Image: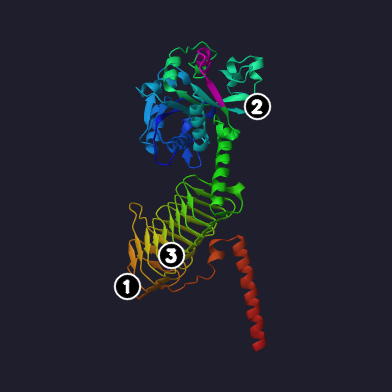
Amino acid sequence: MTENSLDSGLAVVILAAGAGTRMKSALPKVLHRIGGRPLVGHVLDTARDLAPAHVVVVVRHERDQVADAVLGVAPEVVVVDQDEIPGTGRAVEVALDALPGFAGDVLVLSADVPLLDADTLGALVREHRAARAAATLLSAQIDDPQGYGRVIRSADGTVSRIVEQKDADDAEAAVREINSGVYVFRAAELRTQLARVGTDNAQSEKYLTDVVGLLRAERLQVAASVVSDVALVQGVNDRVQLSEAARALNARTVRRWQLEGVTVLDPATTWIDVTATLAPDVTVLPNTHILRSTAVSEGATIGPDTSLVDCEVGAGATVTRTDATLAVIGADATVGPFAYLRPGTELGVKGKIGTFVETKNSTIGAGSKVPHLSYIGDTTIGRNVNLGAGAITANYDDITKHRTEIGDEVHSGSHNVFVAPVRIGDGAKTGAGAVIRKDVPAGALALNVTPQRNIEGWVETNRPGTGAAEAAARARSAQKADDGSQEAADG
């Protein structure tokens, strides 16, 4: 199937109605995130890659929250509500009600199985159609089948039925072939058999798996395709499985970028979301997270110990031991170590944000440097500026945030405070320790000149009995002794 072709004979039903109680979370299970997307988002992406004629998502638990998330990433899908009748069979039944007249194949997926890919599912659909089966299920052989429905086969090897864990006898529970919860059905037969499914079972639910036995009773063919990689069909039911799925997805993502020409020095400590993009010849050093929609251009080096969230990094830039969110870093710029870039930071070409610098909602022009120990907030900095150590733009007056404007080719002394709103003209300079409260004209030197005043004996008078007072007294006595010796020598 080509990327843009539509399979008019395929509908995808995604089951997202469950409560997911084992997650022990206020957030619906299918909205827990791995790889930068919620679980259901990964399933929606895979469904979209199959180019089906219809996608239907069935919701119930926290209905509005799940529906909003689904429609936020896939507005073209149809969201339907499961009623009070429990079970996967009922969920698929209400989904079919949203597809009146559809007579093709129905692919059923679970919203909590995020690692299945379009290649595996496409092959399943092709096998189903080639076999002219009424139903084809995706199964897997696993060493510990606890918790899964078992695929029971007849003596001739054909699929006979599926038995849920709670309904299995000892012999059935010993079967290692499990049902993954992924099926392809012919729509007409599925509609007919779902109408016959009851709730006489250990959980009093309408099982979709019962359709398999009913189809076989009608002597209709049911096929099973055994997946080669068990990880593809593993569901997420608790936080342990969530982390396992996240690590498996991340390993797949990192490997994909390595094959695209990205150097990842330590894949085990590198996390890259599926929504991020990296260009060839990017280098990613250990303990680095490249998250959400971050885009890194060719030749950039990221890490070690760096987290980028929704950032843009230009070609040849270096970002070291940095935490950045919604920031733009220009080509050949350098950031870090120990820098904190908050949303709205824009660093120009060959610019620098150095050690222990925090920036927010600020533009730093090409070639400009904020080398160390500084806070730059709500500020516009021109080209080729150098701010001395300890520069602070005091942007907040307890009521309103104000902006600081620093022109081109400005050099500031150490420990300057720029009290916004204030503008520093092109080419201006400021002295060490200056507090700049007024605009500085272009080419001017701004100084705060205050004579130094020493109050002799202050510590001994005001802090008697302290270590400082005792040290001062000893020093004063020693000085007097030295002065007396010098006078005697001179006399």
Any magenta on residue 196? no
Secondary structure under tag 3 reads loop
Of callouts 2 and 1, the N-terminal one? 2
- Can the viewer see residue 25 in this picture? no
Q: What residue does disc 2 label?
A: 144
Locate residue 74: give its quadrant. Answer: top left
Q: From where the camera sits, is residue 154 visible? A: yes
Magenta part of the protein: which range? 212-224
Residue of label 1: 441
Most foreground residue, 421 or 5: 5
Residue 106 coordinates in the image, percent (x, y): 44, 26
The residue tagged with tag 1: helix, strand or loop?
Answer: loop
Q: Alpha-carbon neighbours of circle 3 within 10 Å: few (<14), some, or many (≥20)?
A: many
Query: Closer to the observer: label 2 or label 3?
Result: 2
Magenta run includes residue 221? yes
Q: Amino acid at mark 1?
A: Pro
Q: Position of residue 147 (x, y in %)?
A: 59, 23
- The residue that appears at 64% across and 19% down in the rendered structure is 173
- Mark 1 burial class by Cα count in 10 Å: few <14, some 14-19, many 20+: some
Residue 349's label in the rendered image is: 3
Question: In the rendered structure, which amino acid carries the disc numbered 3?
Answer: Val
